[in-house]
Image: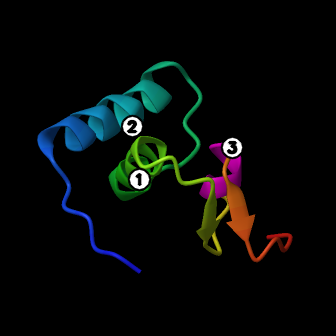
């Protein structure tokens, strides 16, 4: 595991993504933290994530463990 600092570019992208979900009517219930995590995963080309929430899968990433929630 590695800690990665969040810079302005990631923060700005996350904010735009979060606001875009609400304004276009497709509010998936993603928090700003979810959007920040997804922006960072895109940037680092991460495809798999250990998580128990559905947002990882909704965003097109592989959620591990792959269990139905």
Using residue 46 as the reference point, say whether residue 19 is left or right of it.
Answer: left
Mark 2 → mark 3, Cα distance in angstroms: 16 Å
Which residue in the rendered view is the most extreme toward the right? 68
| Residue 3, x across and y down, in percent | 28, 73
Q: Is residue 15 above or below residue 3?
A: above
Disc 2 target residue:
18
Q: How is the image coloured?
A: rainbow
Q: Quadrant of the C terminus?
A: bottom right
Q: Residue at x 49, y 49 (%)?
A: 30
Q: Residue at x 46, y 49 (%)?
A: 38
Disc 3 target residue:
60
Give whichever of 50, 23 is nearer the camera: 50
Mark 1 → mark 3, Cα distance in angstroms: 17 Å
Q: Residue at x 62, y 56 (%)?
A: 56
Residue 2 inside the magenta-drawn segment = no
**Picture quadrant where residue 25 is located:** top right
Q: Residues within 10 Å of mark 3 (few under 14, many from 20)?
A: few
Using residue 2 as the reference point, say whether residue 30 is left or right of it.
Answer: right
Disc 1 target residue:
31
Mark 2 → mark 1, Cα distance in angstroms: 7 Å
Q: What range of the chain is rendered magenta? A: 55-60
Label 2: which secondary element: helix
| Residue 37, x across and y down, in percent | 41, 55
């Amino acid at each position: 595991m590695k800690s990665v600092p969040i810079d302005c570019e990631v923060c700005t992208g996350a904010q735009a993504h979060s606001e875009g979900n609400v304004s276009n009517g497709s509010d998936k219930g993603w928090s700003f933290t979810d959007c920040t995590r997804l922006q960072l995963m895109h940037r680092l080309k991460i495809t798999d994530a250990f998580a128990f929430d559905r947002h990882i899968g909704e965003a097109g990433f592989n959620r591990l463990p792959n269990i139905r929630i």
